Image (cartoon, rainbow, N blue to C red):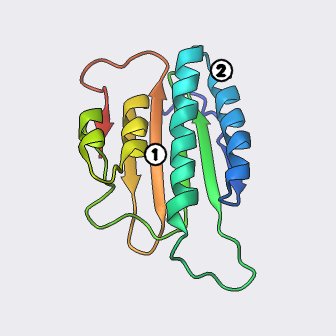
Amino acid sequence: MDAGSHRMPVLELICPPQTEMLSLIRNVVATVARERGFSSDEVNLIESAVDEACTNVICHAYREVARPRGEMPQLSVQIRPASDHLAIRIIDEGIGLPSEGPRSISCLEEYTSQPEPKGLGLYIISQFMDEVVYDSPPGSGTVLSMVKYLRRPDSSQAKRYT
């Protein structure tokens, strides 16, 4: 986005990492995506990627984190619409990612050939969004940043993963 162009506001949802929150998060993300002009198919992809990312937080991020009595863990979903894309960040304060990074599969055949299949959610996220970046500093939880472009970027910008 140009430095001189009007910046869109960030919409932030902060909620407990509970499955009961997933419907609300999906609905808000889908509404913003539709408002920005994404097709129904693209809205479904964005919604699925966000749902998978939030489900991963709920199932994995807080399983080994001791919290002071009365302090509830949080899940933050930041939605930043722009003229040509939608940026979404999923932020948790959980255990973070392993030092080698998130474990994903490269294709569905790899998933089905595993004795204990894992990594499908990360594969879905990477296939449904145009840019996916994980940041997990030691002891600081995880930030997943995802971008979906309204129009496909040229091939030099398509699908960057870190």
Residue 14 as seen in the image, left or right of residue 155? right
Helix, strand or loop status at disc 2: helix
Where does the image place residue 38, in percent across and percent down from the top left? 57, 17
116 vs 27, nearest the viewer: 116
Badge 2, how many Cα within 10 Å: few under 14, some, many 20+? some
Q: Residues within 10 Å of mark 1 (few under 14, many from 20)?
A: some
Q: Which residue is mark 1?
A: 145
Residue 101 percent location from the top left of the image: 30, 59
Give the residue displayed 65% in from the left and 69% down from the top: 73
Q: Is residue 106 above or below residue 151?
A: below
In this picture, residue 46 sits left or right of residue 74: left
| Image location (x, y in percent) of residue 113 | 24, 42
Residue found at x 29% / y 67%: 99
Amino acid residing under circle 2: Arg
- Give how far across and how far down residue 64 sits, in percent: 50, 76
Q: Earlier in the sequence, mark 1 or mark 2?
A: 2
In the picture, the disc for residue 34 is 2
The residue type indicated by label 1 comes to: Ser
Q: Is residue 2 visible?
A: no
Residue at image location 65% in from the left, 63% down from the top: 74
Give the alpha-carbon distance from disc 1 to disc 2, as whole Å: 20 Å
Residue drawn at x 71%, y 56% as measured from the top left: 15
